[in-house]
Image: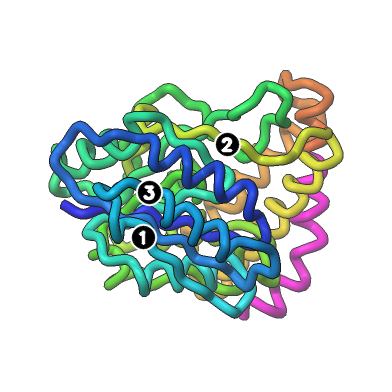
């Protein structure tokens, strides 16, 4: 089995260097091959130089393992699709450029796909790398779950997902309208997983597949901005599928909005900060509705 670990990045050279150093600190204990593909999404900083420096410093056993790819069209989905075209692995893995994987991360991914030949979609736990960071962009559940209905797509995030190459044949790539740098700055990962689950693939959430998110959001205002973007992405993702006549998407959108509104307006026992972040999500959802109806047609 060969795993392709794909990292999309734009103007975050310092963070990328930390991620690559963390990846190459892993010492696999199982029998598999892997490659690292960095997709430079039209960066104007020293990203290319950082990759070259990391390659030059790698020991001989890692010769040829790290590859650089340039995607000139801005947008995370464009970068993800370029990664998919470049990757050579049987199992395709995405992490972000601010992720530190656990020491056994790749071993656990390999183990899950080896133990279950029918497994095609895998998501893992995403924890904060530092206590000072805002609790956003994470998935903290300790419960191992196999999800078979498309609403389970929201259980995982693109900072730690993996899938077999065969999924692309039925699902295609990521929607360039969604994701950072696109018309709607989120939800490209949920949309991809939703389409894959609609195609009949089951999703396993395995908390043993753990990474640490070293994002740069340290203030409440930054966290609210991210949630606002999540809201805009979510409404675009829902509208996209509803406009195609997907009645299941109507159900998912209804219950998602119901749960968010329950949290936002004090009907659930949550902290003031969580309620404010949730209201920011709703503002993004509301403001993104009309543009979504226009752009996702």
Spatial distance from mark 2 to mark 3, Cα to Cα?
A: 24 Å
Q: Are marks 1 and 2 in contact (CB under 8 Å)?
A: no
Which of the two marks, 2 or 3, is nearer to us in this view? 3
Q: Which stretch did the figure color magenta?
A: 278-297
Please say if 212 is above or below 110. above
Residue at the disc numbered 3: 58
Which of the two marks, 1 or 2, is nearer to us in this view? 2
Circle 2 — which element?
A: strand
Of 213 and 164, nearer the camera is: 213
Magenta span has 112? no
How many C-alpha atoms fall within 10 Å of the one at disc 3: few (<14), some, or many (≥20)? some
Give the percent coordinates (x, y) of residue 200: 28, 58
Res 45 → quadrant: bottom right
Give the percent coordinates (x, y) of residue 272: 83, 24
Which of the two marks, 1 or 3, is nearer to us in this view? 3
Q: Main secondary structure of the magenta part?
A: helix
Res 277 → quadrant: top right
Q: Residue at x 32, y 50 (%)?
A: 121
Spatial distance from mark 1 to mark 3, Cα to Cα?
A: 36 Å
Give the percent coordinates (x, y) of residue 38: 46, 61
Relative placement, left or right, of 124 versus 65 is right
Residue at the disc numbered 2: 213
């Amino acid at each position: 089995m060969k795993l392709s670990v794909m990292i999309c990045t734009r103007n975050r050279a310092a963070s990328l260097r930390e991620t690559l150093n963390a990846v190459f600190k892993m010492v696999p204990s199982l029998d598999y091959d892997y490659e690292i593909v960095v997709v430079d999404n039209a960066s104007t900083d020293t990203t290319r130089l950082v990759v070259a420096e990391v390659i030059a410093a790698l020991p001989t056993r890692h010769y040829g393992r790290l590859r650089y790819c340039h995607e000139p069209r801005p947008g995370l989905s464009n970068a993800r699709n370029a990664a998919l075209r470049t990757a050579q692995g049987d199992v395709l893995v995405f992490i972000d450029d601010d992720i530190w994987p656990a020491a056994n991360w790749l071993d656990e991914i390999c183990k899950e796909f080896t133990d279950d030949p029918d497994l095609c979609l895998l998501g893992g736990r995403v924890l904060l790398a530092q206590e000072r960071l805002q609790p956003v962009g994470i998935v903290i559940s300790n419960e191992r779950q196999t999800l078979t209905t498309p609403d389970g797509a929201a259980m995982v995030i693109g900072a730690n997902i993996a899938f077999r190459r065969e999924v692309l044949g039925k699902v295609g790539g990521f929607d360039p309208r969604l994701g950072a740098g696109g018309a709607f700055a989120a939800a490209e990962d949920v949309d991809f997983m939703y389409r894959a689950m609609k195609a009949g693939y089951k999703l396993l959430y395995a908390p043993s597949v753990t990474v640490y998110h070293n994002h740069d959001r340290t203030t409440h205002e930054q966290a609210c901005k991210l949630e606002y973007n999540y809201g805009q992405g979510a409404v675009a993702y829902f509208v996209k599928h509803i406009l195609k006549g997907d009645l299941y998407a109507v159900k998912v959108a209804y219950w998602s909005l119901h749960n968010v509104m329950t949290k936002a307006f004090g009907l659930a026992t949550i902290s003031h900060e969580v309620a404010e972040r949730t209201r920011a999500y709703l503002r993004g959802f509301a403001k993104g509705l009309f543009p979504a109806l226009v752009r996702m047609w």
